[in-house]
Amino acid sequence: YTADHVRIVEVGARDGLQNEKQAISLENKLELIRRLSKTGVTHIEAGSFVPAKWVPQMASTAEILTDLIQKPPVEARPIAYNYLVPNIRGIENLVKIFEQNNHTNPPLQADYPTPPPSPQATPEQTQGQGPITSSHNPNQMSSASNPAVPTSNATGSQSDRNTTEISLFAAATESFSQRNTNCSIAESLHRSLPIIELARKHSVRVRGYVSVALGCPYEGPDVDPHKVAELTASLLEMGCDEVSVADTTGMGTVPKTRKLLQTLKDAGVLMEDVALHFHDTYGQALVNMVVGLEAGVRVFDSSVGGLGGCPYSKGATGNVSTEDTVHLLHSLGCDTGIDLVKMAEVGEWITGVVGKANEGRAGKAMLAR
Ligand code: HMG
Ligand code: MG
């Protein structure tokens, strides 16, 4: 791996909190998102537009989006706030909030922008590598077809800079698809099309998730990598900007992760269109991440303090912590734009609020120094 920019998608406020039994107040969720926004991270999952009876903890998502539109955090870099949507109803509810607030997203750029090197990155960390930009997804908007593409700069009006994104989700096994979304895999793909269409209309970028890619709570550890590759390719072809391949159960190992990434490549999936989302249930997340880096993946999902779990994956522990992820990436000379100490402070604070052990070990160590 080389000194590339690596993008972290911070999922603590969504994946991290969705499984919490005790209600977390709207105030604390907003405080978490605002504190995260000050760490240098540029992608933050902020909630889910799902029925409250399915995931009660995400019931305040409409208020979160409204707040972030009305009082957008002003940081040095634009921030993309992402919301999960399980069906067309989810994105319709999101668009309703855009309309109520007379809000629009800025026009889509051809690709996820690669931020300039962070101020704390050393010259060794940034030399010799161009940004990862090209994408070969034919459905993505190109700047050629969209000449009014703005370039982000820190002086522009903030509401023109932060963006709203969505994620839709499919699963690599039928059992998980049924439990998580009450439909078959084919049906979840079918549901995705009108969601992507509506998102495009509102310049909303779309991530796709493929859950249980390296193990399923119902079907066991041997999930067919060809199925994952097929689903990933389908989501990209349908117009997803990137697909996050998720080890929901943490059953991934180095050989399995290698095999999965090779299978994705063999199926024609480009690593620049792939993100990896590891849960650390078996303690393998960081080594699997290195496998991803070696294969060319440059986007990783993680959660502050290692918060998380999935309501439909019994026993799954949290996502790999953002603090450990950032520590690993910086040690390899990658630039994340994230200030590890600031992230560690957020981890210490939110795990205290939730009453959970802080799983961000690098963060705790940094703060104890
Ligand atoms: P369903 O019950 O089949 O849906 O659920 P339905 O269409 O029959 O609707 C049931 C009720 O919900 C109706 O209301 C609808 O109006 C309402 P009622 O008539 O009962 O009063 N409804 C909605 N309300 C608000 N927002 C909506 C919405 N849609 C319907 N969007 C459904 C199907 C897909 C909705 C459900 O299964 C669901 O929400 N599933 C999502 C579960 C979830 O959020 N899971 C966790 C996220 S995925 C994850 O964590 C994995 C990830 O981290 C990656 C990884 O690690 O693997 C991403
Ligand atoms: Mg997850």
Image (cartoon, rainbow, N blue to C red):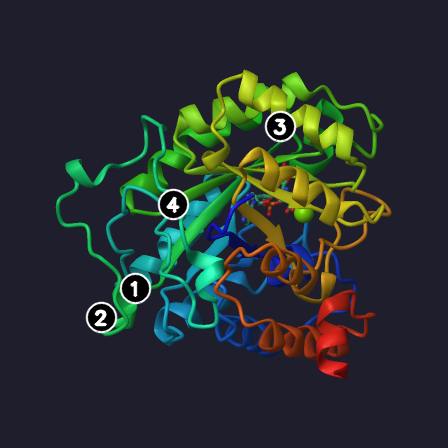
Q: Amino acid at mark 4?
A: Arg
> In the structure shown, which secondary structural element does the residue marked by tag 4 occupy?
strand
Q: Between disc 2 and disc 4, whose residue precedes? A: 2
Determine which of the numbered discs, if any, sits on residue 48 in the image. Answer: none
Give the labeled residue for mark 3: 261
How far is the residue under mark 1 from the one under mark 3?
A: 33 Å
- Of callouts 1 and 3, the N-terminal one: 1
Above or below, comparing residue 101 to residue 249 in the picture: below
Give me the residue at 43% from left, 42% from top. Answer: 206
Distance in Å between CA atoms under marks 2 and 4? 20 Å
Identify the residue position indicated by label 1 in the image: 161
Can residue 42 be seen in this snapshot?
A: no
Residues marked 1 and 2 touching at CB (< 8 Å): yes
Residue 205 tag number: 4
Q: Which residue type does callout 1 highlight?
A: Arg
Instruction: Work out which quarter of the rendered image holds the C terminus and state it.
Output: bottom right
Task: Specify few, some or many for label 3: CA neighbours under 10 Å numbering under 14, 14-19, or 20 or more.
Answer: many
Q: Earlier in the sequence, mark 1 or mark 2?
A: 2
**Can you identify the residue that label 2 sits on?**
156
Badge nearest the viewer, 2 or 4: 2
Give the Cα distance between marks 3 and 2.
Answer: 39 Å
Sequence order check: which comes first, mark 4 or mark 3? Answer: 4
Q: Residue at x 25, y 67 (%)?
A: 153
